[in-house]
Image (spheres, rainbow, N blue to C red):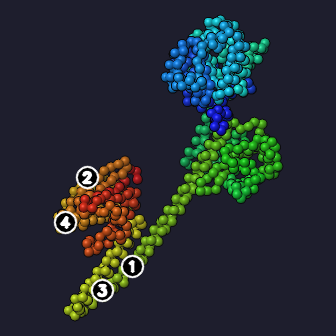
Amino acid sequence: MIEQIGGDRRAVRTVETGLDALRRSPDFRGPVEPLDNHEHVNDHLALIYESREEQFAAAIPFLRQGLELGERCVYITEENPREVVVEEMETRGIDVDAAIESGQLSIHDEHETYLRTGRFDPDDTIAFLDETIAAANEEFDGLRVTGEMGWVLGEDPDVEDLIKCEGKANYLFDEVDGMALCQYNRERFPADVIRDVISTHPHLIHGDRVSHNSYYTPPTEFFGPERPEQEVDRLLGTLREQTEAKVALEERERHLHRHHEITADPDRTFEQKVNALFGLGCERFDLELGAMARVDVDADRVEIEYVSGDHDYLEPGVVLPLSDTYCAATTDGGVTSVTDPTGDDYEAIAVRTEFGFDTYLGTLVEIEDGPDRTFFFMDSDPRDRAFSRDERTFHRLMGQWVKYELERHYRERTLERTVDRLEASNERLEQFAYAASHDLQEPLRMVSSYLRLIERRAPGELSAETEEFLEFAVDGADRMREMVDGLLEYSRIETRGRPFESIDLETVFEDVLDDLQLRIDESDAEITATSLPRVEGDGDQLRQVFQNLLDNAITYSGDEPPRIRVDAERECDEWTISVRDEGIGIDADDPGRVFDVFDRLHTREEYAGTGIGLAICERIIERHGGEIRVESEPGEGATFLFTLPAADSGY
């Protein structure tokens, strides 16, 4: 990371040291980590290459990254002419002219640098690098230098002097804003020199990999009298580390596999899975107890929910002050560990003084729409080493699974409650509609009966105006009864529908045409259809949808004989059915209104009907998991489209 200081273009390095930069670069792969037990190890690397392509594939991105970070960059040529280096830089994304003009980049040969006194002098080379670093830091964010080392072969210097120079460079680049990459052509240098180069560089680049050099030997050891014995120790140590790393990798894979087996087991309950994870975690972390607890930070409260095995103090249901437990440390987020209670200011905490726990590894599990948890492991003995990154990552993995499962449980429970409320609401609605229908039908029938009785008992005695009033009243009562029947039918779509099954729409459509045959003949309607598919649904309700849509198409055909076309088109797991007519159409502002209950677009004098037919169609299609809509323009007809699940969709 680079922090800007005021308006100055210079920056202060924090995280972005050379090794950190390489770790983030897409051009290099490898851990790029400092070596253990070598405090002077720094940003001094060796590039071992076998071809020009391999050389520039590493050296040019190394410099390009330095330019992007605002560093002073220097390339020292020997093996390749300057023009070749410039061409490679430009090919690989560096604006050479601009970088040189700004003073950020310079290209030199060996006679201007390593051999500036006419011969190779290790002390003079170190002095040159020291001067270059100091000059770079006055104006830029640091120095990045790379040099082709083939000049060594021509000058025939003492190889020991070269290696001593490389060793001194390790100390030179320690704790300064400088980074060096020495380039060695494996095809030109003798194998024993390459071996010594490898031994004296803490990090190596070969291909696109930056290697953490386990064979690195500090200069004091490399040139010391006990070098052979120390080399043997280093080789044995490397073998031991490789074996331990292989064993650790196998253990990690075994634990991950076991974690997957537990969490993916469909026959285990959540509690059984949690207890199995406790056992796995105790084995992985070498701790004696696993537990999960509800946490309420505001109330300073923690309640044990699950715990592995039997314990004298901790068991499900036990409530403790959060501040008296290690769990309080997890509330800042992430995986928290305690391995030395006295050194971590937990010496007097109750979970230690009363329960006897000295080691803790836990994480906060934040639950959306539910109480937060802590998932943790403890031990009564203090731990003599910190928990590794792999251990903390594995613990975080277990916590993420707990979070996923609990949130899924809460969502399912919320959904179940919502469904229950909807079912109860629908049942009450149906009961209300039935009661309203029954209670309203009787007085409506009575009104109609008495009005007709008056009409029959006084034939010829009533004035024309009175007879007209009676006709209006009877018609109003009849229409009211039809609306009540429609409302009752609308309320029963969900509760009185049949179970879904494979339905042949072709058969349904033919049945509807038979029912409408009289209207078709009277209106001289022409109805055509493509081959209709099989769908999953309720045959009776789908028959009603077709009947309502076709009846409307005939009704609103205008002055011309109705022309109606029914089509079907499949998309993925559903069919889109369209019913198109050439009638009067619908105003662009009204398409949504046609599906509203009792919302009519025309007066009763223009067109008869209750205004509930399309609302019933919409409710039926929604019950089938589909959608219905209308596309229309006034005078251009209307097309009603609705979707249904295909019979082979696994609905």
- Residue 300 appears anywhere in the view: yes
The kind of residue tagged 1 is His
Horizontal placement of 482 versus 344: left or right? Answer: left
- Marks 1 and 3 sit apart, C-alpha to C-alpha, by 17 Å
- Marks 2 and 3 sit apart, C-alpha to C-alpha, by 48 Å
Query: Dot 4, how many residues are within 10 Å of its Cα: few (below 14), some (14-19), or many (20+)?
Result: few
Seen at 67% across and 40% down, the residue is: 392
Q: Residue 531 carries which label?
A: 2
The kind of residue tagged 4 is Asp
The local secondary structure at tag 4 comes to loop
- Marks 2 and 4 sit apart, C-alpha to C-alpha, by 29 Å
Considering only vertical position in the picture, is 19 above or below 453?
Answer: above
Q: Which residue, given by chain and number where applicable, does mark 3 sit on?
A: 449
Q: Quadrant of residue 369?
A: bottom right
The kind of residue tagged 2 is Ser
The one of 393 and 611 positioned closer to us in this rendering: 611
Which label's residue is closer to the chain start, 2 or 1? 1
